[in-house]
Amino acid sequence: MSIRLTTLSLAVLLTACTHYRYVDPDTPEGLECLHKLHETVSACEAKVKAQQDNFDSLHETQARSTQQCEHFNTLNMPNACPPAPSPTTVPNYCRSGFDEKYKACGGRVEQVEN
C-alpha cells in the first residue's frame, strides 16, 4: 500500500512539472488563423467575465437584501427572510479544444519536461 501511494505521489509531482510550449505557425495564413483564434477566445472570455460579473452583482444584492431583512425583523419571526442563494459560477468553456484549433492553424504544441 505504501509503495502504491509513493508511486502515485511521484506521478502527480511529475505531472505537475509538465509544461507546454506553443510554437506559432510559419506561414502568413497560419498566423492570420492564429490571430482569429485568439480574437475568438478573447471575445468569449470577455462574455464569460461579463456574465460572471452580473451573477456576482446579483448575489451581492440578494445577500444585502437578506441582511437588511434580518436587521429589520424586529419581531424575530422565523423564516421571515429568505436566505440568499449560493453564488453562481459561470463555466469558462472558451479554451475548450484550443490545442486542436491551434494545431489546425499550423502551430505546434510541444511538451516540455522540467
Image: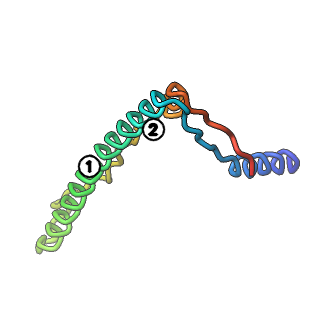
Depth check: 93 or 64 in front? 93
x and y percent of residue 107 in the render?
A: 56, 32
Depth check: 98 or 78 in front? 98
Q: Report how many numbered discs are placed on residues in the image.
A: 2
x and y percent of residue 82 in the render?
A: 20, 56
The residue lying at 77 percent from left, 46 percent from top is 11
Mark carried by residue 50: 1
Mark carried by residue 72: none
Residue positioned most to the top: 104
The residue lying at 32 percent from left, 44 percent from top is 48
Residue 58 position by quadrant: bottom left
Secondary structure under badge 1?
A: helix
In primary-sequence order, the first of circles 2 and 1 is 1
The residue lying at 60 percent from left, 33 percent from top is 108
Mark carried by residue 95: 2
24 up-or-down from 17: above or below: above
x and y percent of residue 103 in the render?
A: 55, 28
Measured Cα–Cα span from mark 2 to mark 1: 17 Å
- For badge 2, the amino acid type reads Arg
16 up-or-down from 39: above or below: below
- For badge 1, the amino acid type reads Ala
Secondary structure under badge 2?
A: loop
x and y percent of residue 114 in the render?
A: 74, 52
The residue lying at 85 percent from left, 46 percent from top is 1
